[in-house]
Amino acid sequence: MPHFSNSVQLKYVKLGYQYLVNHILTLTLIPVMAGVLIEVLRLGPAGIVSLWNSLHFDLVQILCSCFFIIFVATVYFMSKPRSIYLVDYACYKPPVTCRVPFATFMEHSRLNLSNNPKSVEFQMRILERSGLGEETCLPPAIHYIPPTPTMEAARGEAEIVIFSAMDSLFKKTGLKPKDVDILIVNCSLFSPTPSLSAMVINKYKLRSNIKSFNLSGMGCSAGLISIDLARDLLQVHPNSNAVVVSTEIITPNYYQGKERAMLLPNCLFRMGGAAILLSNRHSERWRAKYRLVHVVRTHKGADDKAYRCVFEEEDKEGNVGISLSKDLMAIAGEALKSNITTIGPLVLPASEQLLFLLTLIGRKIFNPKWKPYIPDFKQAFEHFCIHAGGRAVIDELQKNLQLSAEHVEASRMTLHRFGNTSSSSLWYEMSYIEAKGRMKKGDRVWQIAFGSGFKCNSAVWKCNRTIKTPKDGPWADCIQRYPVHIPEVVKL
């Protein structure tokens, strides 16, 4: 007999298993319905009339039944959560005057750290392996030698990023500032007084009864925390529009010391921001791009190592910076594992959940050394938007989730073109997928973000309509060049 693996393609066996398990209810009901239909046909017209006449209907029973059906339907629709729609979003595209090629970045590093050549060499090695391209941007204040991180410069960066994204959002959606009911702004490291949300209200003269929130200190995953907050508010405020603004202001947080753990963010973080319009208005469902399905948040702050792995502090010379721990990737992996455990049952098809359960039982009862089954999340999602925190983050998630190069293409290209734009990076990735014309009606998108604390947050979206390739947006003038090959090391 021929070898089993040669005579039967295991791929088709697995596909058959998935179809069988995922459609078990349909496959069970079909023969039952067919049997009932055959019996009815065997009775004939006379038998059916006789059966109908044998049934006795009482008026009170009919009224009670109707009342019960109406009551159950009312309770169901009243308790059902409101659908939250993502009408549209806009990403900020920095001007070419803010561009920082590798040569410029390294020249500034040599001039600013002239007394510490080892730190310059360290930054060069990081930049070579970072996955960033030549077109990432830093704010004007960082282009000075030495940098001038003043409060005025930081406010100037916040205004140009946030207002540009908001203007683009209003233009794309036709939304008037007076129609904004909820405003949420998240920026982790720059928290002035008045707040950034107050700055937006003042600029656009928003209503006096607007519900505004300003989130700070929550890291790169704050964008999905804002989405979760907006969802909760839209559940209790009917017929409302919510605008979420996600950004990170680089100007006041550019580290000017020589501690290696604090120099790393200088090499990765770049300018960026996004504005998102969410609505629970039923009339918006027809033009909305996506519907929010799930938001799952995981917080590992109870663990001391997780709490301190991304930490803002002063170095020995008093320079303030963000210190990144060597344990960061291991802690991120644990946070992801916890998040997957929660989101898996919500999104995975029955076939994957059954395999996972059987493997878990086998390891507990028969052999603890059995390799744990990693669910195939490609069965649950068509697109993946992984926070572009760095090449190592994307590599680790691609490996752990067993994703293909195409699945992480949006994340890698966003990191290459725009760098790590913190909480807004997910929206540059979503925009990349749209610019490539890959977003079809019914497609499911999984956004995954990590942040200080330590947090791992996920959001699941379902595409409402096939999205045409946009003529504007951050990728409009360069999408034809992507994807590009990104070497492991770029020699500088």
Image (cartoon, helix red, strand yellow):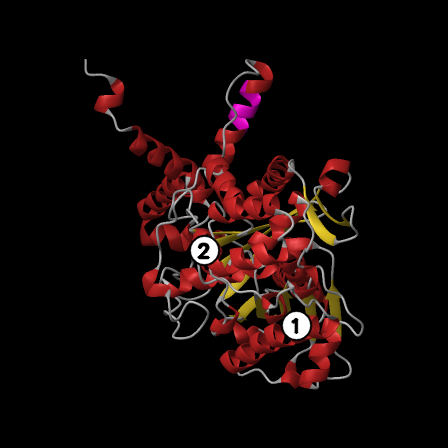
The mark that comes first in sequence, 1 or 2, is 1
Q: CA distance from mark 1 to mark 2?
A: 23 Å
Dots 1 and 2: beta carbons under 8 Å?
no
Q: Nearer the viewer, residue 183 or 331?
A: 331
Residue 162 falls left or right of residue 91: right
Residue most extreme to the front: 115
Quadrant position of residue 167: bottom right
- Mark 1 secondary-structure assignment: helix
- Mark 2 secondary-structure assignment: helix
Q: Which mark is residue 235?
A: none
Q: Is residue 301 above or below residue 95?
A: above
Quadrant position of residue 21: top left
Task: Specify the principal SS of the magenta part.
Answer: helix
Q: Residues within 10 Å of mark 1 (few under 14, many from 20)?
A: many
Magenta part of the chain: 357-362
Residue 325 falls left or right of residue 108: right
Q: Where residue 360 sits: x, y (%)?
A: 56, 25
Q: Where residue 194 sits: x, y (%)?
A: 79, 74
Any part of residue 183 in sight: no
Q: Residue at x 54, y 16 (%)?
A: 369
Q: Where residue 282 sits: x, y (%)?
A: 57, 73
Q: Amino acid at mark 2?
A: His
Residue 85 falls left or right of residue 258: left
* Image quadrant occupied by the N terminus: top left
Q: Where residue 186 sits: x, y (%)?
A: 68, 64
Residue 159 covered by magenta stretch: no
Q: Amino acid at mark 1?
A: Ala
Location of mark 1 (residue): 158
Location of mark 2 (residue): 416
How many numbered callouts?
2
Residue 359 covered by magenta stretch: yes
